[in-house]
Image (spheres, helix red, strand yellow):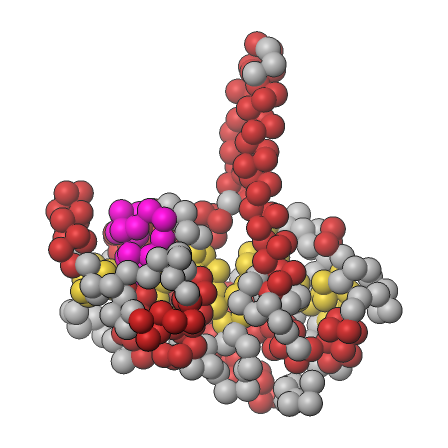
């Protein structure tokens, strides 16, 4: 691995994902070329396979390196076991590079549970954080909205939702430039009296936190920009996320069916195809690249298993932005200021 101390170094799990390593390699090359003066990208995976594809595509960049890793974590592997069973996987080595301070962040479109497990066990948590969180970006009516948690923690306590709110607020203000972001608690009604035991107790913590907490929101409020940060447990959040992802394919089928109903409808669809593509792109994970894993002692971006080269590129750019923003240092400082976390909650 070349010394690139003057550049931000991002490791890529080249073997993780449905279309790995092709899309990972092509996306990494796109990012390395786009920011050749400021980042160095390391492809972690089977060196021979990576070299063959780079040569085939005629890719030769000074800031694109290779780190060999012989093992591959698949979607069928048990996430919690991969730390021990596959210590030389492309994911494990990518995380280890950061632990050894040979990289500043990593990205993976592989097994999400394995990314979480390896990150926690190798990098550890930020002091004061019990549960790391995955945040997902949604295209709101006026600007982006983020939801925490999107699936990292399915059985949460009230204090975990508070941690998600703290980290989410910092991410929105530092990464997306939204000053004093509004925080909403996802529930079954706007009234304080609506919800379950988890949301009742989390509400109390949030309203006394000093965050810009505006109260409960319903599922229909997520995309309205009523709030900037949506807080929920990972069980609910992952269901919301997967439903939102399904809307893109649903709309594509409906548009195609509409166009097939006659010449004039097909002509009309052709006339508005540019607008339709822009709307669908805003909804696509490809546009955002990946989602941040916050609360670990490092920088990690998790991508969709079907990530395209463009999505991989955007994941790398997102990781580079996180490194530059020093988001983890700011989370630590904010936790000290708020003194929010109590073992009794």
90 or 65, which is in the foreground?
A: 90
- The residue at the point 65 percent across, 60 percent down is 236
Looking at the image, residue 54 sits to the left or right of residue 172; the answer is left
* Quarter the N terminus occupies: bottom left
* Quarter the C terminus occupies: bottom right
Bounds of the magenta segment: 11-25
Place of residue 174 in the rendered image (x, y in percent of width and height, measured from the top left): 52, 69
Can you tell which quarter of the image residue 263 is in? top right
Place of residue 41 in the rendered image (x, y in percent of width and height, measured from the top left): 26, 62
Place of residue 57 in the rendered image (x, y in percent of width and height, measured from the top left): 18, 43
Q: Is residue 237 visible?
A: yes
- The residue at the point 65 percent across, 86 percent down is 340
Q: Is residue 20 magenta?
A: yes
Can you tell which quarter of the image residue 211 is in? bottom right
- The residue at the point 62 percent across, 55 percent down is 239
- The residue at the point 42 percent across, 71 percent down is 80
Looking at the image, residue 214 sits to the left or right of residue 231; the answer is right
Outermost residue, top direction? 263
Q: Is residue 39 visible?
A: no
Q: Is residue 193 magenta?
A: no
Q: How many numbered marks, from 0 up?
A: 0
Q: State whether residue 56 is above or below residue 340.
A: above
19 or 219, which is in the foreground?
A: 19
């Amino acid at each position: 691995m070349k010394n690139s101390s003057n550049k931000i170094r991002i490791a890529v799990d080249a073997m993780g994902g449905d279309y790995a390593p092709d899309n990972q390699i092509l996306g990494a090359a796109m990012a390395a070329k786009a920011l050749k003066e400021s980042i160095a990208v390391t492809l972690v995976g089977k060196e021979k396979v990576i070299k063959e594809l780079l040569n085939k595509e005629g890719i030769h960049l000074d800031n694109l390196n290779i780190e060999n890793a012989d093992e591959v974590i698949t979607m069928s592997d048990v996430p919690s076991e991969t730390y021990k069973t596959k210590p030389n996987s492309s994911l494990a080595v990518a995380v280890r590079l950061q632990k050894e301070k040979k990289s500043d962040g990593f990205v993976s479109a592989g097994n999400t549970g394995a990314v979480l497990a390896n990150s926690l066990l190798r990098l550890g948590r930020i002091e004061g954080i019990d549960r790391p969180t995955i945040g997902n970006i949604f295209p709101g009516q006026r600007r982006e909205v983020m939801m925490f948690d999107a699936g990292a923690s399915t059985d949460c306590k009230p204090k975990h939702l508070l941690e998600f709110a703290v980290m989410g607020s910092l991410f929105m203000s530092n990464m997306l430039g939204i000053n004093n972001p509004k925080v909403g608690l996802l529930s079954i009604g706007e009234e304080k009296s609506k919800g379950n035991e988890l949301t009742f107790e989390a509400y109390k913590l949030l309203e006394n936190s000093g965050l810009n907490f505006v109260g409960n929101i319903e599922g229909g409020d997520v995309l309205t920009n009523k709030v900037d940060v949506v807080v929920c447990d990972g069980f609910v959040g992952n269901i919301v996320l997967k439903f939102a992802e399904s809307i893109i394919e649903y709309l594509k089928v409906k548009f195609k069916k509409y166009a097939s109903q006659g010449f004039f409808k097909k002509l009309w669809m052709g006339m508005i195809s540019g607008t339709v593509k822009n709307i669908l792109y805003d909804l696509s994970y490809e546009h955002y690249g990946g989602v941040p894993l916050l609360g670990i002692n490092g920088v990690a971006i998790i991508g969709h298993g079907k990530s395209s080269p463009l999505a991989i590129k955007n994941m790398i750019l997102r990781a580079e932005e996180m490194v530059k923003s020093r988001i983890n240092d700011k989370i630590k400082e904010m936790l000290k200021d708020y003194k929010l976390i109590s073992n009794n909650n």
